[in-house]
Image: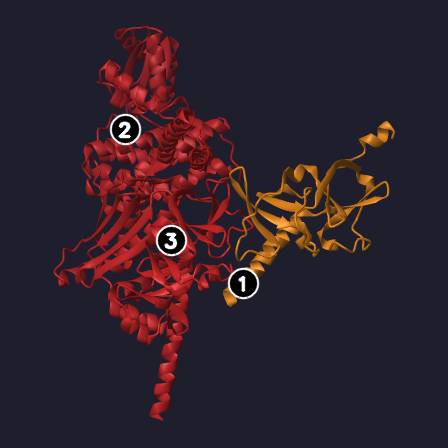
């Protein structure tokens, strides 16, 4: 079924933006609510969010959404008034409702009605509302007679017209055979003298045959109280009636909730208010594409700044220019400063607080813990840490997997924890902080920890490593096995983790963002996963090296050190070139061989080695010469060449030439695979020999 | 030519030479034509991909059409040009011997590919255009370029298996 909504596409777009923010806020707040059930401010905020959602979905004519938000709002109202207690079941239901709301808000995009069932959910919410109502002392009169926002508008209108607004309560004598007729008569009489704003039962209900001995009404009229009373008394069989001036107290209260900024705005000095408005006006939403374009342009500028510097340098070297040369240098330096400033600003503009990713986690951890029947306290630090937008996109999935693992496999059940003399509730701490140009994200749990020996055994069983290799393997290296696909140590497979697909996503995504992952763990104490990623992806420091006539760029964050060695120091291990660096074996790789550039440097006695390292594995790349250290702008090689092995992109140098960027991550991954493969073969050989001997 | 004929659908082509063959591509796909530039070779890239160039800050791959069609490679001359075309989301440069002209060709003068032209693999052809007594080979860019991708994938696979 297709849906038609009131309001333009622009309205819907605005609504979706607002709704997304509100639902995200609700998501977080409801999870907090579970712990702080009586936090008045929190409840007020939640109520306001639900109320706003109800209002704006109503404006768009999204009936199902309005119905659901209305039910939620009523529930929050009960909570707010302390007539209802927060329970885990209630939170479950609210979170479920929130999920459904998301589906409903998607309907605004698809314009199709989803087959999600609203009514049963609304009923469930109603049950909660009703259940508690019986326990709580409820006031009989205000039952369902709270004025809606529409009524409030009408009341306000009536007041503007100079009408007095009255609350009318009356009862029909019980002996009356047809009370509806009498009530009908009363309503007709009231309409004669003024404007009937609201009545329960309404005319429509009466027409439909609703029986009632009571009437509640709000009337806007120019007559006074006595006159109204007289009119009412003129109708027979009325046993009791009251007419009071309508108290706008409650209505105003509701009205206040309606106004979004209202609550904060009221009670503040005009100056403060002005400042608040100014703060709002000072932010603009910018299309992400625009920021990307801006970043590209700044990238160009950085390239040309470098080029300008070179030209100036060359001029100074080769020509007698006198003063003008100094001028040129000063200007170039100045442009350099401006460019740096500009680059920094734009980089900052692209930064988002990691909050964007973190915010969905409390809810997720809570759900996971409940599903697994575990108790988990989840804490987050450093939500305000900022990261480039592109990095944020990469980091979400890995963190989900790490947290899932922590809840599913890390944290023990309450009984197990008791036995281990730990607090019954497990603890997971997610934190982010900046370290130089890196962001470090740590996930720490106090669960059962990882057993390195078990991991190794599993690795051997799955054929990922050889026995010999396993023996040699240090603990830290063994933890890394977790990142290989096809390895899972937990016996239980839940629907979210344990299938051994999660952790390789972690390492892949992090590598994609030029980052690294480390694991620290102690059996019985807990596990800490440390992700380190650069803040931005677009501009990096690089070491430029040359091979024959060609220049290649190696991201500086991958370079551990650079040294020179004599040809004689190259040792051969199983046909592969290696050398000893401070007593440790360092595998060597000729970049020229890798790139089939011909073996120009083989005769040279003096070899330049760039030690590149990813994680704990490093390799020495032999290059012809080192050129310089430079800031480079990473450019894609385009669709046709984008996936070329060994290369992660290209950059443009100061002289306008293109330099290719060496993909250290994939290079090392390949070498590591080869090494593992090799040692497995070795192991096989050894075991074959052993068997032969036994015979 | 009468008015009526002018109304007939026509194509505007950029016409260039590759190894004595006259080729044409639809003008709307051509972004620009530039002089030969230093090309940075890309190791491990498919053979017919000459390398990449810096096109005002954008890095684009360049293919040699001579090599693409199996002709002998020649040293660049004064007339060598790079025709920069946009196909789909990608921008690719094609090295050609010379760029001749821009031509309007009525649709009626275009024939489907036939075995007449043997020098260029007929699968890269969109058709043959006839102007006076000249034959213009209309190139199917998408095919030529998608072949690059396929060739590329093949090479990748080979290296992976090796």
Picture quarter containing residue A616? bottom left
| Chain of the residue displaying label 3 | A
**Residue where numbered disc 2 is placed:** A143
Q: Nearer the viewer, mark 2 or mark 1?
A: 1
Question: Which chain is orange in the rendering?
Answer: B
**Residue B129 at what x, y percent from top left?**
80, 44
What residue is drawn where x is 39% and y is 43%? Answer: A630
Label 2 chain ID: A
Kindly give the residue lying farthest to the front in the view shown: A320
How many residues crowd around disc 2 within 10 Å: few (fewer than 14), some, or many (20 or more)? few
Q: If the image is split into quadrants, where does the C terminus of chain A sit?
A: bottom left
Q: Which chain is red?
A: A
* Residue A442 drawn at (x, y percent): 26, 50
Residue at which label 1 appears: B157
Task: Tell me how far mark 3 sits from mark 2, CA to CA.
Answer: 60 Å
Q: Nearer the viewer, residue A674 or A239?
A: A674
Q: Is residue A51 above or below residue A99?
A: above
Looking at the image, can residue A148 be seen?
Answer: no
Residue A511, which numbered label? 3
A191 up-or-down from A71: above or below: above
């Amino acid at each position: 079924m297709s849906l038609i909504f009131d309001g333009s596409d622009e309205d819907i777009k605005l609504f979706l933006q607002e709704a997304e923010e509100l639902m995200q806020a609700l998501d977080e707040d409801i999870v907090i609510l579970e712990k702080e059930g009586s936090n008045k401010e929190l409840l007020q905020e939640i109520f306001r969010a639900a109320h706003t959602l109800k209002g704006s979905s109503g404006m768009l004519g999204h009936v199902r959404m309005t119905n659901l938000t209305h039910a939620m709002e009523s529930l929050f109202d009960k909570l707010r008034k302390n007539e209802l207690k927060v329970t885990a079941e209630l939170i479950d239901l609210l979170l479920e409702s929130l999920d459904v709301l998301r589906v409903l808000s998607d309907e605004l995009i698809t314009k199709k009605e989803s087959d999600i069932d609203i009514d049963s959910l609304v009923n469930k919410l109603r049950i909660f509302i009703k259940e508690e109502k019986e326990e709580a002392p409820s006031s009989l009169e205000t039952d369902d007679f709270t004025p809606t926002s529409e009524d409030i508008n009408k009341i306000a209108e009536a007041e503007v017209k100079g009408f007095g607004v009255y609350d009318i309560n009356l009862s029909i004598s019980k002996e009356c055979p047809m009370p509806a007729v009498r009530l009908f008569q009363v309503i007709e009489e009231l309409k004669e003298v003024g404007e009937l704003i609201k009545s329960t039962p309404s005319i429509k209900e009466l027409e439909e045959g609703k029986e009632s001995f009571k009437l509640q009404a709000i009337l806007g009229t120019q007559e006074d109280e006595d006159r109204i009373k007289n009119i009412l008394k003129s109708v027979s069989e009325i046993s009791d009636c009251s007419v009071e001036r309508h108290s706008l107290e409650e209505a105003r209260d509701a009205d206040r909730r309606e106004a979004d900024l209202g609550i904060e705005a009221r009670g503040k000095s005009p100056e403060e208010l002005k400042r608040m408005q100014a703060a709002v006006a000072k932010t603009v939403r910018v299309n992400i594409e625009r920021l990307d374009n801006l970043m590209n342009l700044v990238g160009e500028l950085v390239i040309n700044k470098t080029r300008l510097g070179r030209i100036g340098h060359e001029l100074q070297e080769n020509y007698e220019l006198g003063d003008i040369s100094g001028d040129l240098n000063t200007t170039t330096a100045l442009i350099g400063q401006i460019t740096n400033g500009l680059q920094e600003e734009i980089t900052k503009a692209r930064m988002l607080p990691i909050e964007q990713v973190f915010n969905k986690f409390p809810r997720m951890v809570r759900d996971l813990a409940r599903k697994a029947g575990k108790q988990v306290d989840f804490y987050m630090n450093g939500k305000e840490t900022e990261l480039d937008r592109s990095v944020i996109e990469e980091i979400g999935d890995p963190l989900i997997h790490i947290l899932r693992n922590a809840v599913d496999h890390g944290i023990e059940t309450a009984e197990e924890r008791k036995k281990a003399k730990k607090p019954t509730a497990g603890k997971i701490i997610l934190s982010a902080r900046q370290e130089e140009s890196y962001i470090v994200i740590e996930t720490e749990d106090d669960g059962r920890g990882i057993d390195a020996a078990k991991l190794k055994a599993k690795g051997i069983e799955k054929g990922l490593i050889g026995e010999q290799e396993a023996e040699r393997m240090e603990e830290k290296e063994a933890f890394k096995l977790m990142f290989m696909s096809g390895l899972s140590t937990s016996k239980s497979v839940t629907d979210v983790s344990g299938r051994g697909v999660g952790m390789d996503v972690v390492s892949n995504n992090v590598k994609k963002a030029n980052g690294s992952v480390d694991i620290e763990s102690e059996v019985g104490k807990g596990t800490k996963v440390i992700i380190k990623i650069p803040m931005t992806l677009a501009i990096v420091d690089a070491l430029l090296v040359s091979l024959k006539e060609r220049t290649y760029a190696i991201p500086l964050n991958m370079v551990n050190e650079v040294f020179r060695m004599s040809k004689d120091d190259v040792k051969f291990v199983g046909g592969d070139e290696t050398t000893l660096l401070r007593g440790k074996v360092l595998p060597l790789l000729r970049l020229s061989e890798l790139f089939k550039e011909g073996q120009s440097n083989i005769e040279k006695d003096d070899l330049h080695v760039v030690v590149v390292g990813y994680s704990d594995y490093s390799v020495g790349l032999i290059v012809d010469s080192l050129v310089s250290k430079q800031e480079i702008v990473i450019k894609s090689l385009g669709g046709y060449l984008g996936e070329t092995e060994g290369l992660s992109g290209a950059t443009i140098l100061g002289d306008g030439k293109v330099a290719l960027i060496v993909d250290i991550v994939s290079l090392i991954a390949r070498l590591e695979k080869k090494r593992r493969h090799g040692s497995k073969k070795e192991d096989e050989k050894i075991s074959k020999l052993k068997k032969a001997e036994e015979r | 030519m009468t008015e009526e004929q002018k109304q007939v659908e026509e194509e505007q082509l950029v016409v260039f030479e590759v190894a004595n063959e006259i080729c044409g591509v639809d003008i709307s796909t051509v972004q620009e034509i530039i002089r030969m530039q230093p090309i940075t070779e890309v190791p491990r890239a498919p053979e017919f991909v000459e390398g990449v160039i810096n096109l005002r800050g954008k890095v684009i791959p360049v293919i040699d059409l001579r090599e693409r069609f199996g002709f002998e490679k020649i040293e660049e001359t004064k007339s060598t040009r790079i025709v920069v075309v946009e196909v789909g989301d990608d921008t690719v440069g094609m090295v050609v011997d010379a760029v001749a002209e821009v031509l309007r060709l009525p649709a009626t003068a275009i024939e489907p590919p036939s075995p007449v032209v043997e020098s260029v693999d007929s699968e890269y052809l969109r058709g043959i255009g006839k102007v006076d007594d000249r034959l213009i080979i209309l190139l199917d860019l998408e095919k030529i370029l998608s072949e690059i991708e396929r060739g590329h994938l093949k090479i990748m696979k080979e290296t992976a298996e090796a």
